[in-house]
Image: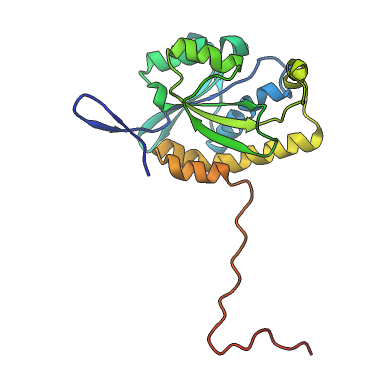
Amino acid sequence: MRAFCFGAGEIIPLMIKLFVGLGNPGPEYEATRHNAGFWWIDALARDWKLNLAPERSYHGLAARANINGQSVWLLEPQTFMNLSGKSVGALARFFKIAPEEILVVHDELDVVPGQAKLKFGGSHAGHNGLRDIHAQLGTGDYWRLRLGIGHPGVKSEVINWVLKKPLKEQREAIEDAIARTLHAAPALVAGEMEKATLIIHTSKPPRPKPPRREPGDGGAPAAP
């Protein structure tokens, strides 16, 4: 099912026109949990054979693709996490991209590594990158792809947790989630949000169904 918004006397199909990955710039942050959003955008850029390049007007690394005749942007804000909205707002305003046409990919404490969740709207839940995007867009009504990084178990350890590298098995699980959720990109661009949600929320491939037994089949052949 496609998503729609209602304009002045018309129904407008929605599609994702801006993919944003959140993180912090600089080599010291590159492999930290807080940069999971950057990892996702980097992977999408490789899939689409795009090169992210500095765009001073939008305070970030950006690339533009043409998908079925429609311009689609990839963006990694280089403002540091707490000012992510400065970058997102600048690009969205210039190209008249509505909040409902934006997908923000970010690290999520409340989801375990290896899983991801697609969500529309809601609060920023204390995530400083989302907090600033809320402020700059004037609304929380945009899409989020929440990449699980797990929780340290103690609130006081959260800052250290997100700014440290995940363990090897955790990084592999996050990379698996990124590879799987990238398959939802065509559906997201097409506005097929139910299809995208099914792809993203399915953490394991479905088990194959057992072969159908034909009438009169006496079961498995006897062992020799």
Residue at position x 49%, y 16% from top?
88
Q: Residue furthest front?
A: 154
Regarding residue 60, the answer to whether it shows in the image is no
Q: Residue furthest left?
A: 9
> Which scheme is used to colour this image of the protein?
rainbow
Q: Is residue 112 above or below residue 132?
A: below
Instruction: Point out the image quarter for the C terminus.
Output: bottom right
Residue at position x 50%, y 15% from top?
133
Q: Position of residue 78 (x, y in %)?
A: 59, 13
Instruction: Point out the image quarter for the N terminus.
Output: top left
Q: Position of residue 34 (x, y in %)?
A: 68, 22
Q: Position of residue 159 (x, y in %)?
A: 73, 15
Q: Is residue 64 above or below residue 133?
A: below
8 or 101, which lies in front? 8
Q: Position of residue 180 (x, y in %)?
A: 60, 43
Regarding residue 5, the answer to whether it shows in the image is yes
26 or 165, which lies in front? 165
Relative to 13, 18 lies left or right = right
6 or 16, which lies in front? 6
**Total number of numbered labels?**
0
Residue at position x 45%, y 37% from top?
188
In terms of image quadrants, where is residue 221?
A: bottom right
Q: Is residue 96 above or below residue 212?
A: above
Q: Is residue 148 above or below residue 127?
A: below
